[in-house]
């Protein structure tokens, strides 16, 4: 079955840039999406179509994709950005959708 | 505004069944798909599948065939997830999430329904 691989954790100091990666064989041809999930809350879409920022998402959130890796970048991370982040995509057939294992971002 | 409001938490015994509802509002129900996502305690998100809200045709991910059933009542803009023969391993939060036809993006989520299976 198709898998997306993320690092379990990333830690940065406030104001630094946090980068969270997501690797998957189909990413050269399929978009990646990124969701932020704060403790006890529903996920929120923060990046769509590899790099598009939905309305209401702060400009410090950006996304990129190159080859088999997609990257979520948080420029000038704030303490309020502490959350679990999940990438999401599909296999090459488009039928098997999957979330990455999630990355816990710590900002302190 | 788009809202997906799910039914409340459930406590069930092993072997029982549960049916979770997800009522949509703020958009035309049949113009978007409905996905279901599971999150076990302390674990990540797991895509369970989706249902075509126009035809009622479901698609189940690997590992979610047999005991899991997606259904609809379009007259009240509500999607349902039924799980039968519950096991302790089914203990999780189950969320409905709106999707876009012709794409696989999920753009809005319900608040999640905790299901606990315990004797």
Image (cartoon, coloured by chain):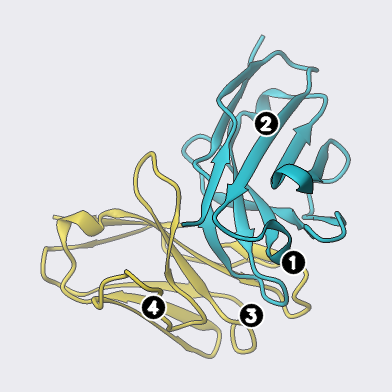
Q: Chain of mark 2?
A: B
Q: Is residue A57 left or right of residue B86?
A: left
- Which chain does tag 3 point to? A
**Residue at image coords 74%, 66%:** A96
As drawn, the label of residue B90 is 2
Left or right: residue B49 versus residue B45 is: right
Kind of element beneath mark 1: loop
Q: In the rendered image, which residue does mark 3 sit on?
A: A25
The mark lying in front, picked from 4 and 1, is 4
Q: Are marks 3 and 1 on the same chain?
A: yes
According to the picture, the residue beneath numbered tag 1 turns out to be A96
Q: Is residue A100 visible?
A: no
In this image, B52 relative to A50: left or right?
A: right
Task: Mark 4 vs mark 3: give the one in front.
Answer: 4
Q: Residues within 10 Å of mark 3 (few under 14, many from 20)?
A: some
| Structural crowding at the residue carrying mark 4, measured as other residues with C-alpha within 10 Å and reported as few (<14), some (14–19) or many (≥20) | some
Residue B112: x and y, percent? 53, 39
Q: Nearer the viewer, residue B42 or B79?
A: B79
Label 4, on which residue? A53
Q: Counting other residues with Cα less than 10 Å from the Cα at mark 1, is it few (<14), some (14-19), or many (20 or more)?
A: many
Q: Which chain is yellow?
A: A
């Amino acid at each position: 079955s198709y898998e997306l691989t993320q690092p379990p954790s990333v830690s940065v100091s406030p104001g630094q840039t946090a980068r969270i990666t997501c690797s998957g064989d189909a990413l050269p041809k399929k978009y990646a999406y990124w969701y932020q999930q704060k403790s006890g809350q529903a996920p929120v879409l923060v990046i769509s179509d590899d790099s598009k920022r939905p309305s209401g998402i702060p400009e410090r959130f950006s996304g990129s994709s190159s080859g088999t890796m997609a990257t979520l970048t948080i420029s000038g991370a704030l303490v309020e950005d502490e959350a679990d982040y999940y990438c999401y995509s599909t296999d090459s057939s488009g039928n098997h959708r999957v979330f990455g294992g999630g990355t816990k971002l710590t900002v302190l | 505004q788009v809202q997906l409001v799910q039914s409340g938490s459930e406590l069930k015994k092993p072997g029982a069944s549960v049916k979770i509802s997800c009522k949509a509002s703020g958009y035309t129900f049949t113009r978007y798909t409905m996905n279901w996502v599971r999150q076990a305690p302390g674990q990540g998100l797991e895509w369970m599948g989706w249902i075509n809200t126009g035809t009622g045709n479901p698609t189940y991910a690997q590992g979610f065939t047999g005991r899991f059933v997606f259904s609809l009542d379009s007259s009240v803009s509500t999607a349902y997830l039924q799980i039968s023969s519950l096991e302790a391993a089914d203990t999780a939060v189950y969320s409905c999430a709106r999707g876009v036809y012709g794409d696989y993006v999920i753009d809005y989520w319900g608040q999640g329904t905790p299901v606990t299976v315990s004797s």
